[in-house]
Image: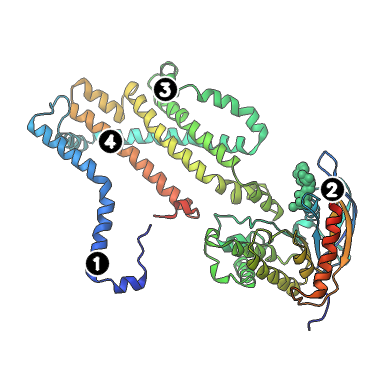
């Protein structure tokens, strides 16, 4: 079954269409005209140096901010989607509510109209997916950093989002935990078939996980690269290292 | 801090050692009471030996006897009821307003600009300084006591609530928004629980000021309540009743604080800082 380049898109996965997207915060534009199409079910990684507008782009896609100009559309087939229901976000920090149990935190991710009878079972299933089913009743403060981030992933997945947006979610984890989390993210993405947009400062992570890597520079897409390698990918693979080198080279060239 | 012993260690330990541990646990919980008990004994002994004059400070046994008489006549319970009602009603008004205004100024910049500097200005007037004015306004009516207690307990609750709401983690609020929480839900699930530790600080401060205010108000301007009981006894040189009244105040104050602490521990059990029993 391995050897396919891209997981089959789930029926409801969201496609993202971005045209002439600009954003400023009163000063110079942070994003200056982004055109980007993300097909349904694609795993897209966004790299770029700090402050280039990666988080800003994600916040716009997630509907947390309004664009200054341009358009942004989420679609599942012909159906237009509202970001509140279709998109889930994972932050660099777990951002768990310390006063809610682990299961309570996962339930935060459920849609408001989920029947009460289903809430617990759905949260429990999402926790099982990230391997924390037996911790449901505990407080978040007893978990390690990696475990907290897994709860945050369960919270993002529990409503079966059509688009999952991840803003450097693994940046604060130690190397070993990070590799485990990368495998988990890839696994749930392949199982669920949602569209994924991952911002990362780790180019190795980007090429290991993504179907496609874009590089943001001065508010524009400076590089758009398809990583057409079979999965699962082995770290240290020569082809992978080749992609990584090309992206790094471009990144460093942009610095000058 | 729970003193939990690993199961294996528990099995291996001889019964005698476990008994020793139990004794030590008891000793540790009794330790805070050692000094007060010794003091009480010294006081009783001093009075019995005649070193402490009865008109200055009656013996603990005499104080207890006076308390017993008051309890028998029903006077004690009636006065405690009156004082407790004043304390609670005044605190409910003042603390409730403090909570409401604190949330308002904590949440909205407009509310803060409108209210906060005025409140801070008023806060600098010691509320007990208003007693003459309050007596002019309300006489020595119930309203006078309620007003003073409410005023005194308003400020600590207000200041700490505002601070608590302000210091809620903005990242959590952003998370709530991103996960589709509307304003009431955001308040209930994130802002209020986040502000709660600080609100409890205000609550306990407010309770302290509540008793202090009530004592002063009842001593100066009342014809019922514990403070009145003490002042009335003073006119008849009943030192034992005066001392007993002070004791009742101390016990009521301690009781209120213990209840607040219990509530705090129940509500904040998620917080590792409050978890140890
Ligand atoms: N809310 C905001 N107000 C003002 N400036 C902002 C805001 N958010 C981001 N910026 C600015 O936009 C730029 C890009 O930020 P960001 O998207 O967070 O970068 P990245 O995630 O790539 O590191 C930065 O210069 C930052 O200062
Ligand atoms: Mg960022």
Disc 3 element: helix
Helix, strand or loop under label 2: loop
Subunit that carries the residue with mark 4? B
According to the picture, the residue beneath numbered tag 2 turns out to be A67
Mark 1 vs mark 2: give the one in front.
Answer: 1
Whether residues under marks 1 and 3 lie with C-beta atoms below 8 angstroms apart, the answer is: no
Residue that appears at 15% across and 24% down: B55
Q: Residue at x 66, y 52 (%)?
A: B176
| Quadrant including the N terminus of chain A | bottom right
Name the mark nearer the viewer: 2 or 4.
2
Residue B184 placement (x, y as % from top left): 64, 47
Question: Relative to A37, does residue B126 appear above or below in the rendering?
Answer: above
B216 vs B62: above or below: above
Residue at which label 3 appears: B128
Q: Which chain is disc 2 placed on?
A: A
Q: Position of residue B259 (x, y in %)?
A: 38, 45
In the displayed structure, does residue B200 sit left or right of residue A189? left
Tell me how far mark 2 sits from mark 3, CA to CA: 56 Å
Label 1: few (<14), some (14–19) or many (≥20) C-alpha neighbours in 10 Å: few
- Local packing at callout 3 (Cα closer than 10 Å; few below 14, some 14-19, many 20+) is some
Front residue of A115/A160: it is: A160
The residue indicated by pointer 4 is B248
Q: Are marks 3 and 4 on the same chain?
A: yes
Residue, x 38% and y 57% (percent of image)?
B1
Query: Counting residues from the N terminus, which is met first, the one under dot 1 or under dot 3?
Result: 1
Query: Which of the chains bears the disc numbered 1?
Result: B
Q: Horizontal and vertical percent for residue B103?
A: 58, 38
Q: Residue B17's mark?
A: 1
Find residue B16 and report its image quarter: bottom left
């Amino acid at each position: 079954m391995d050897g396919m380049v891209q997981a089959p898109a789930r029926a409801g996965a969201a496609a993202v269409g971005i045209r002439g997207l600009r954003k400023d915060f009163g000063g110079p534009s942070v994003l200056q005209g982004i055109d980007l199409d993300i097909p349904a079910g694609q795993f897209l990684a966004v790299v770029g140096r700090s402050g280039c507008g990666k988080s800003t782009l994600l916040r716009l896609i997630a509907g947390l901010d309004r664009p200054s100009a341009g358009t942004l559309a989420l679609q599942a087939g012909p159906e237009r989607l509202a970001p509140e229901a279709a998109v889930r976000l994972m932050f660099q920090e777990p951002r768990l509510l310390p006063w809610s149990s682990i299961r309570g935190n996962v339930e935060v991710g459920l849609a408001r109209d989920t029947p009460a009878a289903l809430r617990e079972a759905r949260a429990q299933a999402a926790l099982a997916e990230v391997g924390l089913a037996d911790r449901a009743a505990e407080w978040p403060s007893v978990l390690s950093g990696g475990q907290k981030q897994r709860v945050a992933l369960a919270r993002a997945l529990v409503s079966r989002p059509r688009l999952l947006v991840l803003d450097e979610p693994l940046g604060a984890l130690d190397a070993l935990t990070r590799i485990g989390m990368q495998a988990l993210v890839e696994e749930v993405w392949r199982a669920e078939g949602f569209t994924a947009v991952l911002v990362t400062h780790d180019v190795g992570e980007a090429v290991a996980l993504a179907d496609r890597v874009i590089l943001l520079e001065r508010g524009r897409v400076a590089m758009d690269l398809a990583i057409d390698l079979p999965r699962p990918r082995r770290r240290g693979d020569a082809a992978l290292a080749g992609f990584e080198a090309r992206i790094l080279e471009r990144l460093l060239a942009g610095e000058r | 801090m729970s003193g939990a012993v690993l199961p294996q260690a528990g099995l291996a330990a001889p019964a005698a050692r476990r008994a020793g541990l139990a004794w030590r646990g008891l000793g540790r919980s009794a330790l805070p009471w050692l000094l007060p008990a010794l003091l009480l004994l010294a006081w009783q002994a001093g009075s019995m030996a005649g070193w402490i004059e009865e008109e200055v400070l009656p013996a603990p046994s005499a104080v207890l006897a006076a308390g017993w008489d008051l309890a028998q006549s029903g006077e004690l319970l009636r006065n405690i009821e009156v004082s407790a009602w004043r304390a609670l009603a005044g605190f409910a008004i003042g603390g409730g307003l403090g909570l409401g205004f604190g949330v308002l100024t904590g949440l909205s910049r407009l509310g803060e600009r409108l209210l906060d500097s005025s409140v801070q200005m008023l806060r600098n007037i010691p509320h007990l300084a208003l007693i003459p004015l309050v007596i002019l306004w309300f006489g020595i009516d119930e309203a006078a006591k309620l007003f003073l207690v409410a005023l005194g307990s308003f400020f600590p609750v207000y200041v700490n609530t505002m601070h608590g709401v302000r210091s809620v983690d903005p990242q959590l609020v952003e998370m709530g928004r991103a996960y589709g929480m509307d304003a009431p839900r955001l308040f209930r699930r994130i802002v209020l629980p986040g502000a709660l530790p600080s609100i409890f600080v205000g609550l306990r401060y407010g309770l302290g000021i509540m008793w202090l205010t009530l004592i002063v108000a009842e001593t100066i301007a009342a014809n019922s309540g514990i403070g009145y009981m003490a002042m009335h006894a003073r006119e008849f040189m009943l030192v034992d009743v005066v001392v007993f009244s002070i004791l009742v105040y101390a016990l009521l104050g301690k009781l209120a604080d213990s209840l607040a602490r219990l509530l705090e521990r129940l509500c904040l059990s998620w917080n590792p800082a409050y978890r140890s029993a």
